[in-house]
Image (tube, rainbow, N blue to C red):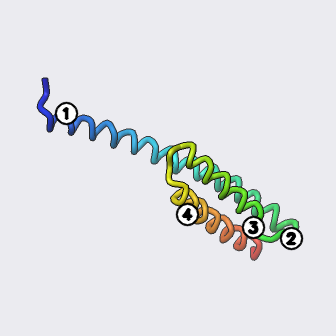
């Protein structure tokens, strides 16, 4: 039987490996998401639509907060995270519009 410190180190290693896998999933998922938002930005630019859509953004924030509560994640954190992503998407859309 291993001592408590060794057991804790093994558990810690397992958790860190899971975190690393989840971080990779997050990065690849964000990459896929941004591919779609770039296409949205291209369509908006081609058709003279505004880079931001406040109604859609509010709906998405409300949806993400609900999903966060279901996932036992702080809805405030989820809202801040989505607001950051939305800000980046709008910035990209503005750049596409200028090009």
Which residue in the protein does label 4 denote?
Answer: 80
From the viewer's perspective, is residue 94 above or below residue 2? below
Which residue in the protein does label 1 denote?
Answer: 7
Residue 48's label in the rendered image is 2
Real-space Cα separation, disc 3 to disc 1, in angstroms: 50 Å
Who's the residue at 67% across and 68% down the image? 92
Does residue 82 appear to the left or right of 51 in the view shown? left
Helix, strand or loop under label 1: helix
Real-space Cα separation, disc 2 to disc 3, in angstroms: 16 Å
**Mark 4 / mark 3, whichever is N-terminal:** 3
Real-space Cα separation, disc 2 to disc 1, in angstroms: 60 Å
Foreground of the two, 23 or 6: 6
Does residue 14 appear to the left or right of 85 in the view shown? left
Does residue 21 appear to the left or right of 32 in the view shown? left
Where residue 98 sits in the image (x, y, percent)? Answer: 75, 76
**Mark 2 / mark 1, whichever is N-terminal:** 1
Q: Kindly indicate whether the residue at mark 3 contacts the one at mark 2 (C-beta within 8 angstroms).
A: no
The residue mark sitting in front, 2 or 1, is 1
Foreground of the two, 52 or 73: 73
Residue 55's label in the rendered image is none
Counting labels gives 4
**Mark 2 / mark 3, whichever is N-terminal:** 2
Q: Kindly indicate whether the residue at mark 1 contacts the one at mark 3 (C-beta within 8 angstroms).
A: no
Report the residue that reaches farthest toward the bottom: 98
Real-space Cα separation, disc 4 to disc 2, in angstroms: 29 Å
Report the residue that reaches farthest toward the right: 47
Foreground of the two, 13 or 34: 13
Residue 54's label in the rendered image is 3
């Amino acid at each position: 039987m291993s001592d408590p410190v060794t057991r804790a180190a093994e558990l810690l290693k397992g958790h860190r490996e899971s975190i690393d896998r989840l971080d990779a999933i997050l990065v690849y998922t964000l990459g896929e998401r941004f591919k779609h938002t770039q296409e949205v930005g291209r369509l908006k630019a081609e058709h003279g639509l505004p880079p931001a859509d406040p109604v859609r953004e509010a709906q998405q924030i409300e949806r993400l907060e609900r999903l966060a509560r279901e996932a036992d994640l702080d809805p405030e954190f989820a809202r801040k995270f989505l607001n950051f992503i939305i800000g980046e998407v709008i910035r990209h859309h503005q750049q596409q519009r200028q090009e």
